[in-house]
Image (tube, grey):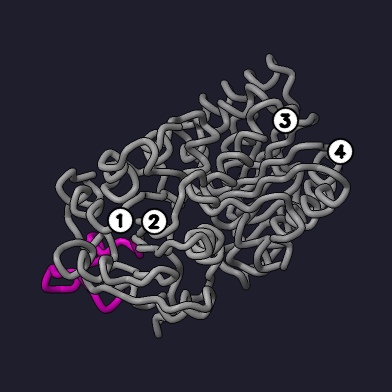
Amino acid sequence: MNLDFAGKKALVRVDFNVPLNSAYEITDDTRIKGALPTIRQILDNGGAAILMSHLGRPGKKRKEDGSIDRERFTLNHIVAHLADALGTSVHFCDETVGAKAEQMAADLPMGEVLVVENTRFNDGETKGDASLAEAMSKLGDVYVNDAFGTAHRAHASTTTVAQFFGAGDKSFGLLMEKEITNANRVINNPDRPVTAIIGGAKVSDKILLLEKLIDFVDNLIVGGGMAFTFLKAQGGEIGNSLVEDDKLDLAVTLIEKAKTKGVNLLLPADSRLADKFANDAQQQITASKAIPADWMGLDIGPAAIESFKGTILSSKTILWNGPMGVFEFANYAIGTKSIAETVAKATAEGAFSLVGGGDSVAAVNQMGLAEKVSYVSTGGGAMLEFLEGKQLPGIAAIGG
């Protein structure tokens, strides 16, 4: 951040879209921790911070009468936790914009923090409404976007608001800078060999990513449910495993593109099967192309794990996005956990590793390995789109 915060109110878009339990207690504060360095730098440099964020999807999960469920989605749930983490006073405004918010921002002492209400309580937020963005801009002297997780959304608080600040009065936050730097390290002149490990349920969710990766990786490991579309496309018998029959031709095209580009495409040699979609299902392990009828693959098998391990440990740059199986079932999380341990080991041996996306991030966090990989991204969808080569609105708005 190249802004002078002394004596200034910094309007900061953070990503505090954290999971809450039924008692509205934070169950994973990774995103809050990610924003702390930016907030601390503003306060330490003599400024005050006004924080904006969304929490959940209040517009889509309304109460029975059609109104916003303010109790469920209020950002007030995170204020005490944030104050404890920062060790300073954190105030809360139950409005995002307007006279009350402007007055609280104006009265905010330097060295303290104000959290304004959930940006998505305002209809214009997701539409990128200019009048809402202008009202937001009145809360601060400078604007900082530190919400990489929402950088792919052209919302009022992430993108439009930036136009109301001059070039010298807006900046990325430290978290955004780290996300961009680490993603660029993977896609621009990485140390080789480069291995991408891509999992998850569907090929259709990651078509553009797979096409992009084949252009620059040396090894492409495909696991999770999406692997069965590739396996069936190769003539394999996959039983009741998840498959996208309308993507079989695409899978063939990607396989052929990998061959043409000299990319080593690895699919799971064997799979851990279940006779029903449940953690307590009957299990067996078979070759991934010889799965019996009425059985489904829910995790990669031991031979696949060993094959993938060897490739990962021989790599200098590693990108991991998506689980190897149904990670929420403990009996089918073996493959994902093994990959997490192997990525951590490769990192310890000198590789650069970037982990991004839902269950792969959850895996390294649950196993206490987050500090043993090079970088854990806070932005699932945003990181995917960045790696696909798309220009993210939240980044472009700052001028990058």
Query: Mark 2 or mark 3: which comes first in sequence?
Result: 2
Secondary structure under tag 4 reads: loop
Q: Are marks 1 and 4 in contact (CB under 8 Å)?
A: no
Residue at 39 percent of width and 39 percent of height:
168
Mark 1 vs mark 3: in front = 1
Give the answer, above or below, for where 144 lies relative to 284: above
Task: Determine the CA span between mark 2 and mark 4.
Answer: 41 Å
Residue at 67 percent of width and 45 percent of height:
354
Return the residue at label 2: 12
Task: Determine the CA span between mark 1 and mark 4.
Answer: 49 Å
Task: Determine the CA span between mark 1 and mark 2.
Answer: 9 Å
Return the residue at label 3: 190
Return the residue at label 1: 140
The boundaries of the magenta stretch are: 54-72
Residue at 26 percent of width and 64 percent of height:
58
Task: Determine the CA span between mark 2 and mark 3.
Answer: 32 Å
